[in-house]
């Protein structure tokens, strides 16, 4: 051992030497140490070690231990599982994580179904015996086959990874629903179903042990599903595996303490009654928004569970009937022998309360819950809060009755400020085109919940969806209630396609027209106005070439309405005087206009440089509601109009909803409820390996980028260094660059203009794209560091779009968009716009429009997509410079890109990646994602990888209720 | 790290520092679980070919188990001292139980990218470090304590300074010297 005195000496010298420059240290030490060579050697060796130590110990021990663990793990376990296959399950996306492991949505390749796959952490599966016990219990619970218990399909292990595959449940956990204004009836229904499940499990001698809001799910159709039966058993610590411990040999559950029963806390004998206690806690929390025992820490929580009586639920929420208080008190009785003995007993008591609630209309009102941490202060907050709320409502009411000020600025629409915003549909599917019944009690909408798009009816405030068009195998969409609420008009693709009308029950379906989309009933209910093109999402530069038609509901007689331009998404005014629609004409940006109901001169309203669309007339005729991105995100707006003349009466007012993208508006007859679709999406870049020999994909798709972005049109530089992509945000549309690891993000542009379709120059130094920074979309280039932005085209047509570099980088193909026609041109990059000699590519023999998308590497051929006169994209083709000939390759598909052999190209059609051999026109399917959507595929410069945009979309119907303020 | 885990760990450490022996075996699986989680992050990075700065990429914030900010009780210094010692015990125990990585295996994990990079990272063998640290404590307790707090406890220089009641600059200096001594001890052992 080192002598302390000696060390002090060394330490001081080391201190001093460290202060000195390297070169002076030797001389300094020679001087100080004199004849003590050992001392000098010691200090010198420590100085050397200090220089060499570098990052040594600079990472925390936790990090070091984790890294060592990662390095000694078998390669196939405990990894990031995304995109991998475990057993027969292909893992698609994470859907949650709990104390018991991560849960993924996976696809069972063998049985062709979706499953929820839970990967168990190694610490829970180290004991074979414990896993075996769990498997036995899992089998027993599966054998019950109870509708309210999630079915366990499979428990197994593959390559050292332990997993549980269960039924995949769409819906929300009660955790997500606490505070979501569930009605008393709904809460009771949830708990009744929970009791059903527990009664069945307990009869089979299975106790859940970990009932909590996270483990109970509510499906959109109203079914309750209990998750993770028996899992708690796995998490009991096996103390034989622990070192240095001399305590009792009982298991300890790692879980959420706030739902544990007194016997669990005290570690006494736990039986099925522990689940009933937990149900009591969950019920209390659903009713009040507050957990009765949760305290600032575990210890205090345990203390409360063992010895404190929580306040009566009714003291926190006056709407709770006294009988329910009594049930909760009994369920939370600390002596298990005095509490409910069976789930059936609890169920029976709850059922009695439910019967009374069902028969009394006063109970159907919403349970207002508040989220608070501790129970006691809440009583005070509740009283105080109520008083304050009353004042606020009174003030608001006075203001409202004093008259609506019509501000000159973009103000908020008063009656919708703080209106209660509730989610009506809770599905992972895409819902669209809601239409409220005139009495405001029902709502119809289109949903692809059943694979095909069908029309569904749901009660406002209810949960059950009724499919009104179940027998149709083709898309049914855009439903619209007739003014008397007896009929629904809709668009159907069933043969023969067209506009159909049915009774509100879905019966007596008949076709009234062979054309039309977006039906809107006239006020007298005699006619339906339609547009002959559809638009689901707003676009800036498409030319929809659409007219409005009036269709007689009885006779089917149809008449075209004069609109002097393209019209889409009509909405009839309530007096029958005018029709509002989304209007595209005169090379101006699309916007909103109205015409007299018989057709005629359109009058534009709310003109701006923003995207305004989806107009809907308010039931009193005073306003036109619409979707607009004038504040950045696509949200709801309205503008006052004169219903007779179409004259705009004030500035647009905003109605702010918490959506990134709100569309498809419907307003109830009394004007109090506004329905809309909240559209949420994110798109990232994914990559899939591609084998050049077999011309097939050679692996699973992996994410390049992650997160809540809307990346599009990814493109990797030919030197492989950076990606460029379009990155629209709430307020801007810019280009970003990032490295192939999806990191080191940098905005290439950062301005209010829209930058789109970026393409790398072949030398990887600059990027061409189109942008509206000059007022209209034109083609620009910019250097990699964001400098040198330069406009290349000065087209006098509507727009110049979609730049495509020639492989030599000397020329650039692009598309000029005229009012009715698109022209493909070639730009000589060595000359300015004014010096360009005519470089129009030839017109197609049949005068079809086409737009160039890629230039072959040998420079001899172009890939293009066809545009029908109405603006639809209808397939791909190749233009050969030598032959000066066009040749169609496919009838559908978009986003074609050449491979380096200048013979094959890839493209995307209906969510599938294809390969086309231009020599034989043979088309091969390459890849289709199991869920969600892929778009805009592009090969890497070496063709060994294909990148694409992976788009995850969810759209649900939401209701704004101006009679209920938040 | 998930906020809840952090809270849970802090609570358990609090109990431990108050003399509750049971807290240890409740804490150990939580920390092991967390280690597995972080390790998975490493693995996924490696698999994606993100190997250039594997270590730097994993946010250090995730490595810290003790929630300093919520620690509002009287004797912070005592708490952190005890916690760091406990973390040391758990992590070294963990390292002791795991098989040592062989040279062959290590080579398998080095991808092309990493092989081309000159790594400046020098990871400690926790078991050997633990022994060397005990040795250091015999003649320079302060340095050993600083290493325990900073490396095992994950405390910052300022927090370490607060615990042992010296100026941050002193912690820096002591840290540098302790590192040099430990580094020399551990490299000469091989």
Image: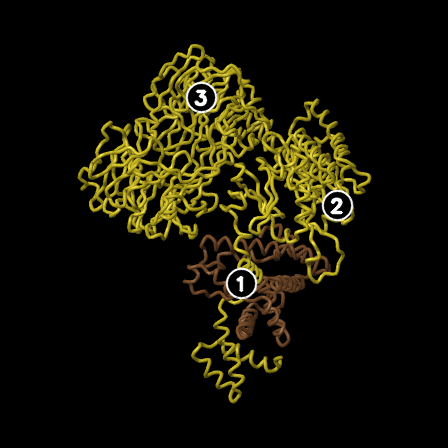
Chain colours: A yellow, B brown
Residue that badge 1 annotates: A59
Identify the residue shown where x is 59% and y is 69%.
B128
Distance (Cα) linking label 1 and label 3: 64 Å
Whether residue B173 appears in this view of the structure is no
In the picture, measured across the screen, residue A403 lies left or right of residue A768, that is right
Subunit of label 1: A
Determine whether A710 is above or below A485 in the image.
Answer: below
- The residue nearer to you, when weighing A412 against A479, is A479
Estimate the x, y position of residue B101 in percent, counting from the top left: 54, 63
Identify the residue shown where x is 51% and y is 42%.
A92
Label 2 crowding class (10 Å Cα cut-off): few <14, some 14-19, many 20+? many
Task: Report helix, strand or loop for mark 1.
Answer: loop
- The residue nearer to you, when weighing A782 against A494, is A494
Determine whether A881 is above or below B154 in the image.
Answer: above
Subunit of label 2: A
- The residue nearer to you, when weighing A741 against A208, is A208
Q: Mark 1 near mark 3, Cβ–Cβ under 8 Å?
A: no
Which quadrant is home to the C terminus of chain A? top right
Distance (Cα) linking label 3 and label 2: 60 Å
Residue that badge 2 annotates: A305
Determine whether A313 is above or below B170 in the image.
Answer: above
In the picture, measured across the screen, residue A29 lies left or right of residue A793, that is right
Whether residue A428 appears in this view of the structure is yes
- Between marks 3 and 2 in the image, the one whose residue lies nearer the viewer: 3
Task: Report helix, strand or loop for mark 2.
Answer: helix
Q: Which mark is residue A937?
A: none
Determine whether A452 is above or below A683 in the image.
Answer: above
Distance (Cα) linking label 1 and label 2: 41 Å
């Amino acid at each position: 051992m080192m002598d302390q005195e000696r060390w002090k000496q060394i330490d001081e010298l080391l201190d001093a030497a460290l202060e000195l420059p390297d070169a002076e240290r030797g001389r300094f030490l020679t001087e100080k140490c004199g004849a003590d060579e050992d001392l000098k050697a010691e200090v010198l060796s420590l100085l050397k070690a200090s220089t060499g130590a570098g990052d040594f110990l600079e990472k925390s021990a936790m990090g070091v231990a984790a890294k060592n663990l990662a390095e000694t793990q078998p390669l196939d376990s405990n990894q990031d599982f995304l995109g991998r296959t475990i057993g027969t399950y292909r893992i698609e996306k994470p859907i949650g994580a709990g104390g018991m492991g991560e849960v993924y949505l996976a696809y069972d390749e063998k049985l062709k179904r979706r499953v929820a796959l839970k990967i168990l952490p190694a610490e829970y599966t180290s004991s074979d015996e414990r896993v075996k016990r769990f498997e036995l219990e899992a089998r027993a619970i599966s054998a019950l086959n109870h509708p309210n218990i999630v079915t366990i399909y499979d428990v197994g292990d593959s390559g050292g990874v332990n997993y549980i595959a269960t039924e995949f449940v769409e819906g929300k956990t009660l955790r997500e629903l606490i505070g979501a204004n569930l009605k008393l009836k709904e809460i009771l229904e949830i708990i009744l179903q929970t009791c059903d499940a527990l009664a069945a499990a307990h009869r089979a001698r299975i106790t859940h042990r970990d009932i909590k809001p996270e483990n109970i799910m509510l499906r959109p159709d109203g079914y309750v599903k209990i998750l993770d039966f028996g899992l708690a058993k796995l998490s009991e610590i096996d103390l034989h595996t622990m070192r240095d411990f001399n305590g009792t040999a009982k298991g300890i559950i790692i879980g959420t303490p706030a739902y544990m029963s007194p016997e669990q806390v005290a570690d006494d004998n736990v039986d099925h009654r522990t689940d009933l206690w937990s149900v009591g806690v969950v019920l209390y929390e659903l009713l009040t928004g507050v957990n009765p025992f949760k305290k600032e820490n575990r210890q205090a929580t345990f203390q409360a569970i063992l010895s404190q009586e929580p306040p009566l639920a009714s003291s926190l929420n006056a709407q709770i009937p006294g009988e329910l208080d009594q049930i909760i008190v009994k369920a939370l009785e600390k002596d298990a022998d005095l509490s409910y003995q069976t789930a059936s007993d609890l169920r029976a008591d709850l059922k009695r309360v439910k019967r009374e609630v069902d028969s009394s209309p006063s109970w159907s009102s919403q349970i207002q819950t508040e989220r608070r941490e501790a129970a006691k202060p809440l009583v005070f907050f509740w009283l105080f809060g109520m008083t304050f709320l009353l004042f606020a409502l009174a003030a608001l009411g006075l203001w409202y009755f004093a008259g609506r000020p019509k501000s000159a600025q973009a103000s908020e629409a008063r009656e919708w400020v703080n209106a209660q915003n509730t989610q009506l549909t809770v599905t992972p599917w895409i819902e669209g085109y809601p239409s409220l019944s005139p009495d405001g009690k029902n709502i119809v909408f289109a949903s692809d919940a059943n694979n095909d798009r069908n029309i569904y009816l749901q009660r406002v405030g209810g949960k059950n969806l009724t499919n009104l068009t179940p027998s149709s195998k083709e898309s049914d969409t855009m439903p619209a209630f007739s003014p008397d609420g007896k009929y629904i008009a809709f668009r159907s693709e069933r043969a023969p396609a067209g506009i159909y009308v049915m009774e509100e029950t879905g019966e007596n379906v008949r076709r009234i027209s062979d054309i039309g989309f977006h039906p809107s009933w006239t006020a007298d209910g005699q006619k339906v106005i339609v547009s002959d093109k559809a638009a689901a999402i707003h676009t800036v530069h498409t030319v929809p070439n659409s007219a409005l038609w009036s269709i007689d509901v009885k006779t089917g007689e149809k008449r075209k309405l004069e609109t002097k331009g393209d019209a889409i998404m009509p909405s009839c005014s309530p007096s029958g005087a005018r029709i509002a629609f989304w209007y595209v004409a005169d090379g101006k940006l699309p916007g909103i206009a109205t015409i007299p109901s018989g057709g005629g001169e359109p009058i534009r309203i709310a003109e701006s440089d923003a995207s305004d669309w989806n107009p809907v007339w308010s039931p009193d005729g005073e306003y036109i509601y619409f979707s607009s991105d004038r504040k950045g995100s696509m949200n709801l707006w309205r503008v006052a109009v004169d219903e007779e003349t179409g004259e705009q009466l004030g500035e647009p007012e905003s109605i702010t909803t918490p959506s990134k993208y709100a569309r498809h508006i419907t307003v109830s007859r009394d004007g109090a409820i506004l329905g809309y679709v909240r559209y949420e999406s994110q798109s990232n870049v994914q990559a899939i390996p591609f084998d050049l020999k077999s011309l097939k994909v050679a692996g699973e798709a992996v994410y390049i980028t992650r997160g809540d972005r809307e990346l599009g049109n990814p493109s990797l530089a030919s030197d492989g260094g950076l990606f460029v992509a379009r990155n629209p945000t709430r307020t801007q549309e810019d280009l970003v660059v990032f490295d192939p690891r999806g990191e080191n993000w940098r905005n290439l542009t950062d301005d209010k203009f829209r930058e789109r379709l970026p393409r790398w120059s072949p030398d990887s130094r600059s990027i061409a794209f189109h942008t509206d920074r000059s007022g209209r979309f034109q083609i620009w280039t910019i250097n990699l560091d964001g400098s040198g932005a330069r406009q290349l085209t000065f087209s006098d047509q509507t727009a110049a779009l979609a730049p495509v570099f020639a492989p030599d980088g000397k020329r650039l193909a692009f598309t000029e968009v005229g009012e009715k026609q698109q022209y493909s041109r070639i730009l000589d990059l060595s000359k300015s716009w004014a010096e360009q000699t005519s470089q129009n590519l030839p017109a197609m023999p049949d005068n079809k429009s086409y737009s160039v998308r890629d230039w072959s590497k040998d420079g001899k051929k172009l890939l293009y997509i066809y545009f029908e006169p109405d603006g639809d994209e209808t397939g791909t083709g190749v233009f050969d410079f030598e032959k000066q000939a066009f040749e169609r390759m496919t009838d559908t598909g978009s986003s074609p890109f050449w491979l380096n052999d200048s013979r094959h190209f890839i493209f995307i059609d209906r969510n599938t990646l294809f390969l086309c051999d231009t020599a034989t026109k043979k088309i091969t399917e390459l890849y289709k994602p199991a869920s969600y959507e892929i778009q805009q595929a592009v090969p890497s410069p070496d063709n060994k990888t294909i990148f694409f945009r992976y788009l995850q979309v969810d759209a649900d119907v939401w209701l704004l209720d101006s009679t209920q303020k938040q | 790290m998930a906020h809840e885990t952090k809270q849970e760990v802090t609570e358990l450490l609090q109990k431990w520092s108050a003399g509750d022996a049971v807290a240890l075996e409740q804490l150990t699986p939580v920390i092991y679980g967390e280690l597995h989680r972080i390790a998975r992050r490493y693995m996924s990075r490696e698999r994606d070919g993100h190997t250039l700065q594997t270590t730097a990429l994993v946010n250090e914030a995730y490595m810290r188990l003790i929630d300093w900010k919520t620690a509002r009780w009287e004797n912070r210094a005592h708490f952190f001292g005890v916690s760091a010692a406990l973390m040391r015990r758990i992590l070294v125990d963990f390292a002791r139980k795991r098989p040592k990585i062989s040279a062959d295996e290590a080579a398998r994990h080095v991808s092309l990218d990493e092989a081309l990079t000159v790594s400046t990272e020098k990871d400690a063998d926790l078991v050997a470090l633990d022994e060397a640290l005990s040795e250091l404590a015999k003649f320079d307790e302060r340095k050993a304590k600083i290493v325990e707090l900073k490396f095992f406890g994950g405390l910052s220089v300022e927090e370490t300074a607060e615990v042992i009641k010296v100026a941050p600059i002193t912690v820096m200096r002591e840290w540098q010297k302790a590192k040099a001594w430990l580094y020399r001890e551990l490299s000469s052992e091989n």
